[in-house]
Image: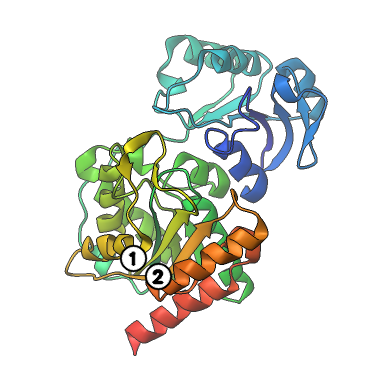
Amino acid sequence: MSKLLILAEGYLADPHHGKTTRGVVNYGQNEVVTIVDSTFDGTDFQGIPVSATIAAALVHGPDTALIGVAPTGGKLPSEFRVQVLEAIEAGRDVEAGMHEFMADDPELSARANARSVELRDLRRPPDDLSVPTGANLEHAADVVLTVGSDCAIGKMTIALELHRTAQNQGRASVFVPTGQTGIAIAGWGIAVDAVVADYIAGASERLVLEGASQGDLLWIEGQGSLIHPLYSGVTLGLYHGSMPHHLVLCHRAGDLRIDGWPVHTIPPLSELVEIYERAALPARPATVAAIALNTSRLDEQAARVAIEEAEAETGLVAGDPFRFGSDRLVEAVGTAIETRKA
């Protein structure tokens, strides 16, 4: 177990690009002892002290620095490079989920070797990946994939909340990480968006088989969206490689267009259900078992109305698992599993 110092400079208040910080704080197995963000200096974040500098953060005894941001494009921001070098010089291991790998950077690698510290690139895929073998159709686990109307709307958080609830109900439940934040949380996984396109499905199959060796109910962390103009390829590869039996459709209530791409509208939920179900491979039809809404932009009354409207439109159980609990959604998934097996 590590004691983490999270580098979040300028992003601690950003639920989108700061999602790695929030995910690790809320769900990670390692203890977060401090966060570095000079814009929050002297305060705390969910009870964790926030420091302005690496030097000030070291008094809390961290042994590992984790870059807690997820910038568009996955490149290391320049301000973080300085902090990474400071952490290395202080003798701390460094973990990052960038597409640019620290271990491939001559300066960072040389400094790390000189200080005998480890650079862990969470997004680096295994060297031996290939296409699927067909074993994704042969295991005995029930597989549930979170899919969405857009990126960064909570697919990972929803999978984690449903997994926790299923665990509390006594199920042999497994959260299967498919991105850098999920890996930082769970301590294993493959970031499928860093895999050669031909091998995304093979990587996804490998993750499912690993999950099936740990339990019999798998919650696959979703990535991107089938209707996203940038990242739909990753979504489809993960979908077809993981071969889910059921889907949980995630949507941020009130969103009408893809974030940052206003020309791309988000279809009604009922249409999204059809899009996702039709995209399944014929060998493993997948049904949407429930609708998970992110109602963070609504007050409580409006959130409840949005949930009721989603249920009326789709005929499916809907809810916000983070705000109102996950019991009904997990029950809906369980019912879908029982119906399929009947």
Per the model, the C-alpha gap separating discs 2 and 1 is 6 Å
The residue at the far bottom in this view is 342
Could you tell me the amino acid type at mark 1? Ser
Q: Is residue 142 among the parts visible in the rendering?
A: no
Q: In the rendering, at what x and y percent does residue 218 appear?
A: 44, 65
| Crowd tier of the residue under label 1, counting other residues whose Cα lies within 10 Å: few below 14, some 14–19, many 20 or above | some
Horizontal side of 245 relative to 182 (left or right) equals left
Q: Residue at x 62, y 41 (%)?
A: 22
Q: Quadrant of the N terminus?
A: top right
Residue 283: give its label: none
> What kind of residue is marked 2?
Glu
Q: Kindly state the secondary structure of the residue where label 2 is placed.
A: helix
Left of 59 or right of it: where is 171?
Answer: left
Q: Residue at x 28, y 61 (%)?
A: 276
The answer to whether residue 327 is above or below residue 86 is below
Pinpoint residue 83: horizontal percent, then vertical percent.
62, 16
Task: Please count the marks in the image.
Answer: 2
* Mark 2 lies on residue: 313
Along the line of sight, which residue is nearer the eye, 323 or 211? Answer: 323
Q: Could you tell me residue 169's position as x and y percent? A: 61, 76
Q: Residue at x 59, y 22 (%)?
A: 117
Snapshot quadrant of residue 73: top left
Assess whether mark 1 and mark 2 are in contact (beta carbons under 8 angstroms). Answer: yes
Quick one: label 2 or label 1, which is nearer the N terminus?
A: 1
- Location of mark 1 (residue): 270
**What is the secondary structure assignment of the residue under circle 1?**
helix
Q: Is residue 92 above or below residue 32?
A: above
Q: Colour scheme in the image?
A: rainbow
Asked if 23 appears above or below 305 in the picture, the reply is above
The image position of residue 118, as x and y in percent, is 55, 26
Task: Look at 57% across and 18% down and name the residue there.
Answer: 80
Q: Nearer the viewer, residue 166 or 136?
A: 166
